[in-house]
């Protein structure tokens, strides 16, 4: 198990390195847009980019670097030619900065000259605060509905729960929050239509959590309900449970002592993986409701083509996704001792 764990973690980091490398090189093929402003502002911007290592400055034209990004003649009459540094050279500087100084670059347009990782750290807490209540609500609600539907299999209760779950699971979270906004905010006026500011009252800030929590909870509740119903129904129809009934156990005893314990083996790892993946958040939901989290930052960085912030945010999402997968695989072995990945035959 230890050897398997080390291998999976190393593989996750190798996969993340490959993803980020390809993403960086592909993004560097996109157009480079200088900061807006007068010539003095642009000159300061390009001087900063030269210092960072993204741009090369020459006193004469350089044909081997293609067309210049910008040409500027200063007050002394000297002409400066700015060229984009090759993507490979930029990549080497970027990787060196990460490993030596944990420097992921600075924001160009979202918050100019602010360190990209500082922006990520300042918004992670908000994303967790939005997603944590959704997990706390969806896990017991989804499992409870799934158990109820399994115990009432093929009865009216089961049909009603399955129908409602099928309806809600087909609606994405950003559509759900749009419907909730239209109903609870614009029509009824019960909840704020956007994320409350820090200066808002405590009551208003608490009410601001309700809409995103509801929008994120519906999909998770539906997923847990379907998964729990399917697993519990399969276990309840197994031979070992029939044997337990023939030995004198009541239906309630056989379900609580045997059926639920076996059905939880594939369910609990998915819960643990979702808790680990809290930082992932919901990008579109944060953008629609104005939540100042890492998801909204990601969308803003894409729209403004702020590549440094985008890479830092993408690194966060990539590592969370890969490490959540590793944690999910390992949790099977800890929950059920009969499962040991990587063990010798």
Image (cartoon, rainbow, N blue to C red):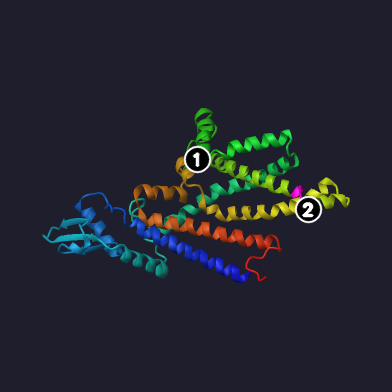
Mark identifier at residue 174 = 1
Q: Is residue 218 left or right of residue 100?
A: right
Question: Within 10 Å of the Cα at label 2, are there few (<14), some (14-19), or many (20+) other Cα atoms?
Answer: some
Q: Is residue 34 left or right of residue 298?
A: left
Q: Which residues are magenta?
A: 235-240
Which element carries disc 2, helix, strand or loop? helix
Question: Within 10 Å of the Cα at label 1, are there few (<14), some (14-19), or many (20+) other Cα atoms?
Answer: many
Mark identifier at residue 258 = 2
Q: Is residue 18 left or right of residue 226?
A: left
At x 23%, y 54%, the residue is 42
Quadrant in the rendering for residue 21: bottom left
Q: Position of residue 274 (x, y in %)?
A: 58, 52
Residue found at the far right of this picture: 248
State yes or no: residue 151 in magenta: no
Mark 1 or 2, closer to the camera: 2
Q: Position of residue 186 (x, y in %)?
A: 49, 30
Question: Quarter holding the C terminus?
Answer: bottom right
Q: Earlier in the sequence, mark 1 or mark 2?
A: 1
Residue found at the far top of this picture: 187
Question: Quarter holding the N terminus?
Answer: bottom right
At x 53%, y 34%, the residue is 180
Q: Is mark 1 in CB contact (under 8 Å) with mark 2?
A: no
Mark identifier at residue 145 = none
At x 64%, y 46%, the residue is 224
**Residue 198 visible within the image:** no
Q: Position of residue 276 (x, y in %)?
A: 57, 56
In this picture, is 254 found above or below 174?
below
Q: Is residue 289 left or right of residue 271?
A: left
């Amino acid at each position: 198990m230890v050897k398997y764990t080390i291998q999976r973690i190393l593989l996750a980091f190798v996969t993340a390195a490959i993803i980020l490398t390809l993403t960086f090189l592909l993004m560097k093929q996109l157009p480079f847009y200088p900061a807006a402003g007068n010539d003095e502002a642009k000159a300061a911007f390009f001087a900063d980019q030269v210092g960072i290592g993204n741009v090369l400055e020459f006193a004469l034209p350089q044909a081997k670097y293609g067309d210049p990004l910008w040409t500027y003649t200063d007050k002394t009459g000297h002409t400066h030619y700015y060229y984009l540094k090759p993507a490979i050279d930029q990549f080497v500087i970027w990787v060196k900065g990460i490993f030596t100084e944990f420097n992921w670059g600075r924001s160009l347009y979202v918050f100019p000259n602010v360190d990209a990782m500082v922006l990520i750290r300042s918004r992670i807490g908000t994303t967790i605060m939005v997603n944590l209540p959704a997990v706390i609500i969806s896990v017991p609600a989804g499992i409870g509905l799934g158990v109820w539907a399994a115990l009432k299999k093929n009865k009216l209760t089961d049909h009603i729960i399955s129908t409602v779950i099928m309806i809600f699971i087909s609606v994405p979270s950003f559509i759900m929050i749009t419907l909730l906004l239209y109903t609870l905010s614009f029509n009824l006026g019960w909840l704020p239509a956007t994320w409350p500011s820090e200066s808002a009252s405590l009551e208003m800030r608490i009410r601001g959590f309700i809409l995103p929590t509801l929008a994120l909870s519906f999909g998770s509740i539906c997923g847990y309900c379907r998964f729990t119903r399917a697993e519990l129904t399969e276990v309840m129809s197994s031979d070992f449970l029939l044997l337990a009934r023939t030995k004198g156990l009541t239906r309630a005893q056989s379900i609580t002592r045997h059926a639920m314990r076996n059905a939880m083996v594939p369910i609990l790892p998915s819960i643990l993986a979702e808790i680990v993946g809290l930082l992932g958040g919901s990008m579109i939901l944060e953008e629609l409701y104005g939540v100042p989290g890492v998801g909204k930052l990601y969308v803003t960085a894409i729209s403004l083509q702020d590549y440094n912030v985008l890479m830092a945010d993408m690194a966060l999402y990539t590592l969370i996704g890969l490490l959540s997968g590793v944690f999910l695989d390992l949790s099977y072995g800890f929950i059920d001792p009969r499962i040991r990945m990587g063990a010798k035959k």
